[in-house]
Amino acid sequence: MEAIKNSDAGAGGESGAGVIKGSSFRDYWYTDIREITGIRDMLEGSAERYAKNAAFWVKEKKGAPYKAVSYELLLHDVKCIGTALIEAGFAGGRIAVMGQNAYEWIVSYLSAMTAGSVVVPIDKELTAPEIANLLRAGGVSTIFCTRGECPKLDGIEEIENLIVMDFYGDRTDLDTPAPDDDDPDLLTWRKMLHDGEQLLIKGDSRFDEVKTDPDELAVILFTSGTTGNPKGVMLSQRNITTNIMDVCRICQVYETDKTLSILPIHHTYECTLGMLLVLYRGASTAFCEGFKYISQNMREAQNTFIIVVPRVLELVSGKIHKEIVKSGKEKTFRRVMKLNKALRKAGINLSRKIFRSILEGLGGKLRVVITGAAALDPNIIREFEDFGVMVLQGYGMTECTPLISGTPGSAPKERYRKAGSVGAVVDRGEIRIADPDGDGIGEVLFRGPNVMMGYYNMPEETKQVIEEDGFMHTGDLGFVDPEGWLYLTGRKKNVIVTKLGENIYPEEIEDEILREPTIEDCIVFPYKVSGEETVAIQILPNAEELREALGHDPDERETLAHFQSLVREFNDGLPIFKRIRSVFVRREDFVRTTTRKIKRQDNPVSQETMYWDD
């Protein structure tokens, strides 16, 4: 592919200069794309093409074997629940869906949307007051909720209709109450399924007659402000379907593929890429039973691809290396890795045979990993590629439904060489770098049909992030290389500016220092010493690695001394203005989002959570 120059990369923006168009990368894109305009169009098209294929793999209870749910049955269930919503008078309004990753969750989401409702996914980890605040802000009166999360909803006045998602997988007699259902007035998913099915048998066609406009509001996703005035991202069905098709141009997904759902389903990353995209391609999804069951479920499901955050890959990589050290085969492993690289350079790819035992530990059939939501160490990317597993990095945000760019599956050499990049902008999108500095680093702006409709009831906030020409401010800093691939350097709001005007990007320092095994996680942040802004770091120790490194369980004094020594050594390789002046060691984990990202603003220095030298 020819190099793309910023000065002539295509039209757009005020002058057209500096715009990188996704269409410039079409030599990379997969072309087997089925055009869709809405969610019903996608679902019915897949049910017609892949009727007998498994759409989902579910367990009736923990520890049970996975059972297939076909596309034909999925569409039937969506129609049943959708018809029951219409009959009950719930359709057409705002309907929330909350709970653990489950078949019932995605069917409720699909049913509500295709029955003409606006869906409001809710994070099950929120507190009762936070949930009430979001329901109030979104104008929600009806909510689907998994049984285990229902106690959080007690006393929330906004809820007029509660539907308990409690299906047990036994379809032989839907008239029979669930085993622990002792409340005849309780409205359950099982009852809705039964009632909708009976209506369909009698010829009820109201669900099929519902017409939805793909450009009207379909989903409200609250990204922040769970107390006070919440910020709700408004998405249309066209936002979603456009992004689904663009992601499939980047990553080839086959109808024989199977994924394992791990990330929170209310998040657009998991919902759009991990659920809807899979359904669009006729592939299938197995539901993970919990974070600690990932390895076990991978072996049971034998999934071929997986969508994760970097932390999952980091843990898997660490576990692999620990096993290698434990077996005493470190030298052999290094020799084999070197041999495999040489063979690949010669055009001979035996990676999956050479590293068969490692792949068996990952279920045996894993071929693709999609990772996003945070930066991933390029060395880990290259390592998995050496094992024969394709690693595709994605970059996006909820406001973009979510994908903005991704590393193309059809470009193995470029992916390997550019492992630090988040790839090429999506086919129907454009990016430009605003106000680049001398190194070409500036804020990433994005424009495309997957950009949100705006923030719900927040016109001023919407104007602040979306310019008149359609470009959206992402708040992320980055640059593009001569071939148009995007690299991120950090968040605009996280930049530390010294008194001499030098910019320090915390993420850049964090990526380097996290290579130290005894550090589980960290954040670099500005900290005032004698009135001067300096660079500081909070470190979360890896207790197991620290114990091995020191030969015993260290006390707080020894732990602090260990990390201070590491930071002094690390500082030797940094320019003076970037050097870390203060080291804080955490006693407990960081406050995080549900996708395991650290909430920087919610982790202030506190003697209750960390210790340091005064």
Image (cartoon, helix red, strand yellow):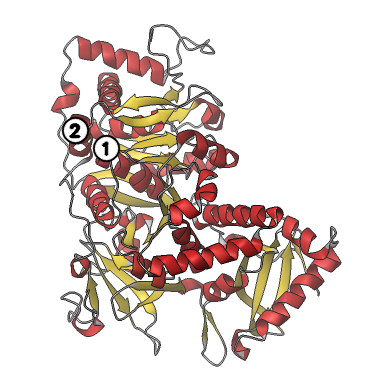
Above or below, comparing residue 60 to residue 354 in the picture: above
Q: Which residue is mark 2?
A: 49
What amino acid type should be assigned to the residue bearing mark 2? Arg
**Left or right of residue 34, residue 176 in this image:** right
Horizontal and vertical percent position of residue 461: 35, 62
- The front one of 227 and 256 is 256
**Residue pictured at 64% horizontal, 84% vertical:** 579
**Left or right of residue 600, residue 606 in this image:** right
Marks 1 and 2 close (CB-CB < 8 Å): yes
Query: Crowdedness of circle 1 by 10 Å Cα count: few (<14), some, many (20+)?
Result: many
Horizontal and vertical percent position of residue 110: 30, 34
- The front one of 97 and 59 is 59
Q: Which residue is mark 1?
A: 282
Task: Please state, as top left, top right, bottom left or bottom right, where the C terminus lies in the image.
Answer: bottom right
Task: Please state, as top left, top right, bottom left or bottom right, where the N terminus lies in the image.
Answer: bottom left
Above or below, comparing residue 486 to residue 395 in the picture: below
Horizontal and vertical percent position of residue 51: 23, 27
Quadrant of residue 66 within the rendered picture: top left
Above or below, comparing residue 33 to residue 46 in the picture: below
Query: Crowdedness of circle 2 by 10 Å Cα count: few (<14), some, many (20+)?
Result: few
Quadrant of residue 454 within the rendered picture: bottom left
**Left or right of residue 247, residue 348 in this image:** right
What amino acid type should be assigned to the residue bearing mark 1? Gly
Element type at marker 1? Answer: loop
Is residue 224 something that shows in the picture? no
**Residue pictured at 73% horizontal, 59% vertical:** 545
Spatial CA distance of label 1 from label 2 is: 8 Å
Precedes in sequence: disc 1 or disc 2: 2
Element type at marker 2? Answer: helix
- The front one of 196 and 541 is 541
Above or below, comparing residue 499 to residue 272 in the picture: below
**Residue pictured at 14% horizontal, 34% vertical:** 211
